[in-house]
C-alpha cells in the first residue's frame, strides 16, 4: 500500500486542543474486515477454519459484570459496535471535547497478535489490521493518529512491520502486545532497534488476554476470582516490565527508546521507582550497566497515561501524587469508548491549571512522533 510521507500531512505542532493517547477502534465485522487486506491463500485459510466464529472474549469468570466493556451510548447510527465507525468517533468524541489528536490503539489486533493466533497467522493479521486502519480510518480526519500493532510472537517480523508502516505521517507510536517475556529481555531487541530507527515510541497496553490465555502474562500469586479482582491486578504486569527495562539496562543500549504505559493508571510507578532506586544504590554492582538512578531513566524515557485515574478522597492527595510521578511524564487518555473512560472536561479538575494543561495538551507531543514544521512542504 502506498502511504503518505510526513511531508504530505498537515502540521500538528501548534494545534491547541487536547491530545488523547488512548482511543480504541474496532474492525466491526471482526476478522472478516481484514480479508481484503490479506493474500488470497491466507484469506482462504481463515475462511476454511471459520476464524470469524472463534470468539476472543474472556472466560465467564472475567466477563464484565454489566455484560460489555463498551458504552452503549457510543454505538454508531448504523448499529455497529462502539468504536467501529471513524466518522462517529470524530463526531461523538473529537469534536465535542476539543481533541486535536486521538491515538488509535486496536485491542482486537493486540490480542490476536499476542496469543489468539499462531505465529505465522499473527504476522498476516498484524499487516492486514495495520493496512485496514491506515486505509479506512486515517484518511477520515487528520486528527486521527495510529499505533500499528506488531506480531510480538516473532520479533524479526515485528521489526519488519515497524519499518513497513512506520513512515506513515499519522503513525505516532508502535503498539507491542505483551507476551510472557519481560520487556527488558534481549528477545525484544530487534523491535526496540526498529522503533529507534523510525523514531517511534513504544505503546504498552493490556490486550485483555492477561491471566486468561496461555502465553499471555500471568498475575502474581495466583488466579483472581472475579472481573474486578483481575482489573485491580492488571498493573502488576506494568510494574514487572518497567523493572525489567531498567535493570536490564535497556536505555543504555537504546538511548533513543521511549515508552508510553497506557491504561495502567499512574500511581503504581511511585513505589516501584522508589524501591528500584533504593536497591540499585545498595546493589548496583550486580547491574553495572545501569549507570544512573532508575528514577532518572524513567524521567527521561518513560511516560504514563492518566486513565484510569485513581482519585483519593482528598483532592490535595491527587496533586501530591501527580507531583511525585512527575507532571512532565503524564499524558492524558480517555479510553474511549470503554465503560470507565475519563472525559477531558471532568478529569484532573483539582490540579493547578498549569499542570492540568501540561498533561492534557502538551506532554504527549514530547513522546509521540508527530509531523514537524520543517517536514511539511
Image (cartoon, rainbow, N blue to C red):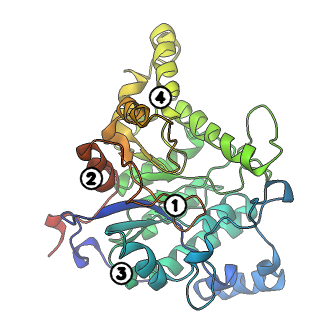
Question: Residue at (40%, 26%) from the top-left corner?
Answer: 295
Q: CA distance from mark 3 to mark 1?
A: 19 Å
Pointers 1 and 2 in contact (CB under 8 A)?
Answer: no
Q: Residue at x 41, y 56 (%)?
A: 346
Q: Which mark is residue 362?
A: 2
Secondary structure found at label 2: helix
Corner quadrant of residue 108:
bottom right
Report how far apart the C-alphas of labels 2 and 4 lie in the structure. Answer: 22 Å
What percent of the width, then of the height, locates residue 60? 85, 59
**Which numbered disc covers residue 335?**
1
From the image, tell me which residue sits under label 3: 141
Disc on the earlier residue, 3 or 2: 3
Which of disc 4 and disc 2 is earlier in sequence? 4
Q: Nearer the viewer, residue 67 or 125?
A: 67
Q: SS class of the residue under badge 3?
A: loop
Q: Is residue 300 above or below residue 77?
A: above
Q: Is residue 325 left or right of residue 155?
A: left
CB under 8 Å between callouts 3 and 2?
no
Question: Could you tell me which residue is drawn at 43 percent across and 22 percent down?
Answer: 290
In the picture, the quarter occupied by the N terminus is bottom left
In this picture, residue 46 sits left or right of residue 325: right
- For the residues labelled 1 and 2, the Cα–Cα distance comes to 18 Å
Q: Is residue 119 above or below residue 275?
A: below
Helix, strand or loop at disc 4? helix
Residue that numbered label 4 is attached to: 270
Q: Nearer the viewer, residue 181 or 67?
A: 67
Amino acid at each position: 500500500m502506498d502511504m503518505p510521507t510526513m511531508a504530505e500531512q498537515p502540521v500538528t505542532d501548534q494545534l491547541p486542543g487536547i491530545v488523547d493517547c488512548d482511543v480504541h477502534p474496532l474492525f466491526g465485522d471482526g476478522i472478516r474486515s481484514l480479508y481484503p487486506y490479506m493474500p488470497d491463500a491466507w484469506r482462504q485459510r481463515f475462511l476454511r477454519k471459520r476464524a470469524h466464529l472463534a470468539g476472543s472474549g474472556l472466560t465467564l469468570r472475567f466477563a464484565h459484570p454489566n455484560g460489555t466493556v463498551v458504552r452503549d451510548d457510543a454505538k454508531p447510527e448504523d448499529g455497529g459496535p462502539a468504536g467501529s465507525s471513524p466518522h462517529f468517533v470524530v463526531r461523538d468524541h473529537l469534536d465535542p471535547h476539543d481533541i486535536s489528536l486521538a491515538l488509535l490503539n486496536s485491542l482486537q489486533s493486540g490480542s490476536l497478535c499476542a496469543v489468539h493466533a499462531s505465529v505465522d497467522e499473527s504476522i498476516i493479521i498484524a499487516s492486514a489490521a495495520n493496512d485496514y486502519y491506515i486505509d479506512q480510518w486515517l484518511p477520515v480526519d487528520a486528527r486521527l493518529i495510529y499505533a500499528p500493532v506488531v506480531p510480538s510472537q516473532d520479533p524479526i517480523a515485528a521489526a519488519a512491520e515497524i519499518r513497513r508502516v512506520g513512515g506513515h505521517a499519522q503513525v505516532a507510536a508502535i503498539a507491542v502486545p505483551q507476551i510472557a517475556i519481560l520487556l527488558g529481555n534481549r528477545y525484544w531487541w530487534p523491535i526496540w532497534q526498529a522503533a529507534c530507527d523510525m523514531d517511534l515510541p513504544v505503546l504498552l497496553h493490556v490486550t485483555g488476554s492477561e491471566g486468561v490465555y496461555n502465553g499471555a502474562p500471568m498475575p502474581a500469586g495466583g488466579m483472581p476470582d472475579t472481573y474486578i479482582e483481575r482489573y485491580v491486578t492488571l498493573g502488576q504486569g506494568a510494574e514487572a516490565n518497567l523493572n525489567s527495562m531498567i535493570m536490564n539496562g535497556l536505555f543504555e543500549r537504546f538511548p533513543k527508546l521511549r515508552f508510553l504505559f497506557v491504561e495502567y493508571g499512574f500511581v503504581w510507578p511511585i513505589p516501584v521507582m522508589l524501591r528500584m532506586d533504593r536497591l540499585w544504590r545498595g546493589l548496583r554492582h550486580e547491574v553495572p550497566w545501569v549507570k544512573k538512578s532508575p528514577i532518572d531513566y524513567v524521567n527521561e524515557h518513560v511516560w504514563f497515561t492518566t486513565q484510569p485515574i485513581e482519585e483519593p478522597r482528598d483532592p490535595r492527595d491527587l496533586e501530591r501524587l501527580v507531583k511525585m510521578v512527575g507532571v512532565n511524564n503524564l499524558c492524558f487518555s480517555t479510553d474511549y469508548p470503554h465503560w470507565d473512560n475519563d472525559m477531558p472536561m471532568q478529569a484532573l479538575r483539582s490540579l493547578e491549571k498549569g499542570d492540568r494543561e501540561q498533561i492534557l495538551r502538551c506532554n504527549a507531543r514530547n513522546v509521540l512522533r508527530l509531523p514537524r514544521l520543517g517536514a511539511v512542504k
